[in-house]
Amino acid sequence: VRDEVLDVVVVGGGVLGTAAAARLAQAGARVALVEAEPDIAAGASKGNAGIVTAYYAPKGTLEAQLLLDSLYRWDDICERLDVPFDRCGVLTVALDDEQREALEPLAAEQRGVGLKPRILTGAEARELEPLISPDACAALFLPEEGIIDPFRLVWGYAELAAANGAEILMSNSVIGVTDNGDGTITVETPRRTVRARYLVNAAGLGSDAVSALAGGERFHDWPRKGQYWVLDRSFGAQLQTVVVPVPGKITRGVQIVPTTNGSALLGPDAADHEDPLDVAVEPAALAELLAMTSQLIPSVPEQTPIKTYAANRPASDEPVRVRRDARRPWLVHAFNRSTGVSCSPATGERVLELLREAGLECGDRDDVVDRLEPVPRLLFAEDPTALPALDPRYQQVVCACEQVTAAELAAAVESRVPARSIEGVRMRTRATGGRCQGAYCLAGVSLSCSLAAGVAPGAVGQGPRAGTIGAFGG
Amino acid sequence: VGEVAVIGAGVAGLVVATELAGGHRVTVFDRVPVTGGVLGYRQPLVRELTAGATRAGVRFALGTGALRWRERQLLAAGPAGIAWSAADQVVVCTGYRPRTLAELGIAGPRLAGVLPVTAAVHLLEAGAVLGRRIAVLGGGWWARRLAELTGSHTAIVAIGDDEAAPTFAAEAWPSWQAVRLRGTDRVTGVFLEREGATELVSCDAVATAQVDMPYRNVDGALAAGTDGAWFVHPLEQTADQAAAEAGVAATTIVTEWGGH
């Protein structure tokens, strides 16, 4: 319907764009979400450690407020969106006297925003997390924090948006935004032209470019590369909590993170650079990650690494930009340098408020979809033997390492925002993401994708961007 | 006499199961519905070993993947459903898998067109065209199988294979080591190193074919030293060699059990 005028175009299918789209669609706004890459969560939203943070910025800042407004909603959101979540706490470990002295001021700041940190002795910390170094002399435990599956969160937001009528347009990079002068704007991509009244700029590392295209404020965002190790479930299963060093000036430092899928992450480091496409892993940086994390947990180097990867998070002089544009009354920015996942529920809410201030008229609908049908996972099922009664495809294990079945694969490729690539299936199900990295299931997964999408197996996407398994798209 | 689950119905699993069948109740699990593993069920040796195992009283749960082992119970999924069954001991005979990029220490971006050789072979068998110039990292059975399937219009660049020049390779870089991938969306080349020298090999696909990591995927039976879990790792080479090595390994296991 070419002449239809939508309420809002959201640019960016990352955690903030999908959170905003979900909230707007629930409020009854007619929404299109445009994403440059072939799938959601293609940028910083997949390259993060999956931590739900409670404290990252001083009291009184926008970031602190967004974190707190999100913090107590996670149990409810994750239950409704079928997102793995575990409020396992974060343990900040001090290895010497200087670090120990840094704990109390940090705890005081955290208490200042209403959190309940506990200062522990070395012995108490080791009781809580027996893996940490005998050198640990004190620690700070923050029980409100936890771990989440960041891909499943983005997928959940996107599914919820789609269930409430939002149109999700992948592989559509914005190349033009025109103010029509009649209260509408026109958003152009190489493949589509969409008219709407408002624009939400949640383009992550593309935010500066989108703002410039829209005639909004000029600012500069740049990539901050972080590298990660993924360690086997045999190690992840032993971890009780997230283990982090006493924070440095710029970042929280390299963390040891149990993931909701049972593996563990080491990372990220932080290196500012200028090429958003540079996601190369570098042996020297990876070696440094191992050295740093083994100070916290000495057994780290003995573990089995199953993957290394790098991702860029967006850095900026304005670390959290969730506000209206100063030049364009119809433009709202939703940008976060690091705590995008942790701030996402409140950011979605805030974007709705800002658009209402700008004149968007919508109330909450009474026919709103506010939960998704959960997909049981064989690996985490309380009683796996009961699953085939739900769907006989649970008997067919496709990915042996992560124990992902044909039923789970089908849910991923048949959903409203379906996986169309190996990477998309991995993000939604974990298939190909385990210790053999697809040696035994990648071919089968690509056949599932090819059947669902109606393309040849070689034309199925493989990497994070547009690349396909086969050389000639077939 | 106890329940023994042998995981993997390849040559090693068949030999081990037959050896153990005299003193134990033995069930062989395999996630595919036939015996033979990497050799395939058509091999005369595989048929002979399968028949021998059956005669010895070995039971088969084929098409049934073992998932978890705990408290002497094995969870497996197959056509009969998902169920726990008694397994006092498990013997893991699931062979080898290709090393991952992380295990190979290969730097650079993670790109399309880079595949474990096992997946590459299955995709070629399904008719996919993977590339015109495929860099194969490592040699051996799977690399040769890939070369057989790609045909004459595809050039194989053999990297790091100890053989001086594999007959299937259009180009060979023996004793060079792949250190880094090049590309943005899709792989366009591999950087190699040898004794401080660096070279770039252009390609449009990469197969990782160093198939020497023990394949472990039964939770609870992952690490050596786990009480009641045993591991056999047959090498791939020829059927006879594999059988011989598996036999040796099986004998060792039986011997070790004596004192267990």
Image: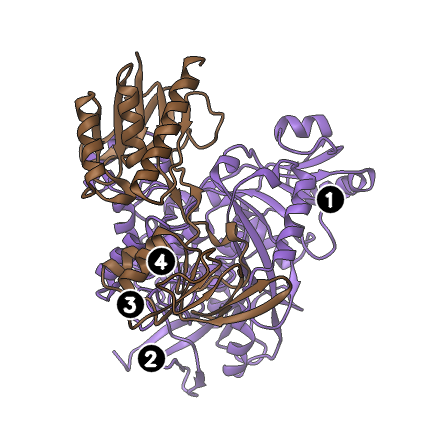
Chain colours: A purple, B brown
Residue drawn at point x = 43 percent, y = 78 percent: A174
Which corner quadrant holds the C terminus of chain A?
bottom left
Question: Could you tell me how far apart the alpha carbons at marks 2 and 1 are, in whole angstroms?
Answer: 49 Å
- In the structure shown, which secondary structural element does the residue marked by tag 2 occupy? loop
- Mark 4 against mark 1, which lies toward the viewer? 4
Q: Is residue A204 left or right of residue A458?
A: right
The part of the image, by quadrant, that contains residue A173 is bottom left
Label 3: chain?
B
- Numbered label attached to residue A106: 1
- CA separation, marks 2 and 3? 31 Å
Of the numbered discs in the image, which one, if any, rests on residue B129?
3
Instruction: Specify the subunit that label 2 lies on.
Output: A
Asked whether A111 or A148 is in front, the reply is A148
Q: Earlier in the sequence, mark 4 or mark 1?
A: 1
Of badges 1 and 3, the one in the foreground is 3
For the residues marked 4 and 3, what is the alpha-carbon distance in whole angstroms? 17 Å
> Measuring 68% from the left and 39% from the top, which residue is drawn there?
A296
**Do marks 2 and 1 share a chain?**
yes
Q: Mark 2 against mark 3, which lies toward the viewer?
A: 3
Mark toward the start of the polypeptide (4 vs 2)? 2
Q: Residues within 10 Å of mark 2 (few under 14, many from 20)?
A: few
* Rendering coords of residue B197 (x, y %): 62, 67
Picture disc at residue B151: none
Q: Amino acid at mark 3?
A: Val
Q: Chain of mark 1?
A: A
Which residue is the site of mark 4?
Answer: A422
Image quadrant occupied by the N terminus of chain A:
bottom left
Residue in front for this viewpoint, A59 or A307: A307
On the rendered structure, is A473 left or right of A239? left
Residue in front for this viewpoint, A366 or B1:
B1
Q: Earlier in the sequence, mark 2 or mark 1?
A: 1
